[in-house]
Image (spheres, rainbow, N blue to C red):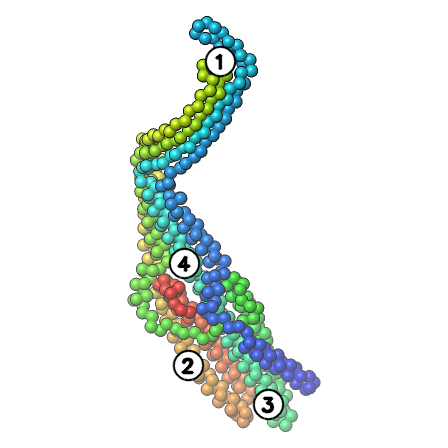
Amino acid sequence: MKMTQMNTRSYITFILVFFGIYMNAQQLLTPDEAVLLTLDHNYGIQIANNTVNIAENNTSIFNSGYLPTLTGNAGATYNLDNTEAEFSNGNTTVLNGAESSRYNASINLNYTLFDGLGRLYNYKRLKEQYQLSELEARETIENTMLQLFSVYYSVAQLSENTDAIKETFQISKERLTRSEYQFEYGQNTKLDVLNAQVDINNDSISIVNTEQQLINAKRDLNVIVGNKLPEEFNVDTNISFLFDLDKEELWTKTKANNVSLLQIDKNINISSLDVKSNRSQYLPTIGLTGSYGWNRNNNNAAAFVAVSTNTGLSAGVNLTWNLFDGGSTLTRVKNAKITLENQQLQKEQILIDLERQFKNAWDDYQNKVLIYELQIENIKTAQNNFDRSREKFKIGQVNSIEFRQAQLNLLNAELSRNQAKYNAKLAELVILQLSGDLLNVKF
């Protein structure tokens, strides 16, 4: 029985050592590399960029309405008629199966000289829509970056948690070995050995669960970066904080650069142009037309002219003025004004809500940084308590239950420290997103 336990422990030790060496040989994914992979391969970002490209195409001169239209027309007609013709001199001609044909071709030009400035406002609207699509793409990128680092730091936290639990496992192994030796020499009871074995099993279960969570988190991270990561990789667990952040300066940046505010400003501009575009329909439209044509007629014998061919150029100016359209233009103008007013009201609402979000995010960041600093101090206390308990356990002044409690206290302190560290960093990134600086910092 004892030999079986020793073989099992040796096997577990070999697996853990091999796993540790293997993990050290894995590729290290840095935050900057994760960002670049996400920007290049994340499907949501690619779709957002394609939407921007569509909006940019819409701002082309070919979609502005300022260019003329040029069309070509051609046709041919063949007639087979039975004709009875009576001439002015009294002669009569009867034709059966008389053939005639007509051919024509033309090129026609149409150009709108003036349409009440509707084209101008529509073209400006397309420009604003393009800039709005860029802001929407930026919002998608910012949200994806937050999602990326939420998962990235989850992988980092689980990696550190795994190391901490493995260290606890190694200490539990040493404790089991000591308990077995003490039992052999009659210095303790079988109960201490059994307790040590139970604790090793619990630590092993914790390792298995944490490693599975780590594997799942890595898969989640791989999805975000477009499935471009190797099967095995590590992440960087070293992070730094921007402790020089200034609240007032960040709030000023938020009011100037927050993507939601910039979007509503663009929507206000678009609604304002919609009002002007609809108003332009009150004015007349002046157009220029021109054509160059060719016509050939092959007449039957009843006609005075057997064959006639015409070529010529024609041009003209037309004016169209919709004096009354039943009130539809008036309705569109009124609705556009209401939409503009709603956009302005929405901006005021966003400002109020944004101030609340900023204050909450700032306080949350300050609290989480403070908690992280307290957890660092807590680690020192837990480590000191564990070291003392370990020395006393070796000389028999602390029993196994008290030693295990000190061991768990240290482990829980390390796990809490890891969680506090990455929570604080994510809170910092939320602040940067609100202020519009998220994409300007080096991760």
- Label 1 Cα crowd, 10 Å radius (few <14 / some 14-19 / many 20+): some
- Label 3 Cα crowd, 10 Å radius (few <14 / some 14-19 / many 20+): some
Identify the residue position indicated by label 2 in the image: 377
The residue under the point 50% across, 9% down is: 93
- Which amino acid type is marked by label 3? Arg
Identify the residue position indicated by label 1 in the image: 302
Identify the residue position indicated by label 3 in the image: 178
Which mark is in front, 1 or 3?
1
- Could you tell me which quadrant the N terminus lies in? bottom right
Q: Would you say the residues marked 3 and 2 are in contact, meaning their CB atoms lie under 8 Å apart?
A: no
- Label 2 Cα crowd, 10 Å radius (few <14 / some 14-19 / many 20+): some
Identify the residue position indicated by label 4 in the image: 138
Q: Earlier in the sequence, mark 1 or mark 3?
A: 3
Residue 302, above or below 148 = above
Residue 337, above or below 198 = above
Camera-nearest residue between 199 and 357: 357
- Which amino acid type is marked by label 2? Glu
Q: Where's residue 389, x and y in %? A: 50, 88
Camera-nearest residue between 92 and 132: 92
Q: Earlier in the sequence, mark 1 or mark 2?
A: 1
The residue under the point 48% across, 25% down is: 103
- Could you tell me which quadrant the C terminus lies in? bottom left
Q: Would you say the residues marked 1 and 4 are in contact, meaning their CB atoms lie under 8 Å apart?
A: no
Which mark is in front, 2 or 4?
4
The residue under the point 36% across, 54% down is: 263
- Which amino acid type is marked by label 1? Ala
Q: Earlier in the sequence, mark 3 or mark 2?
A: 3
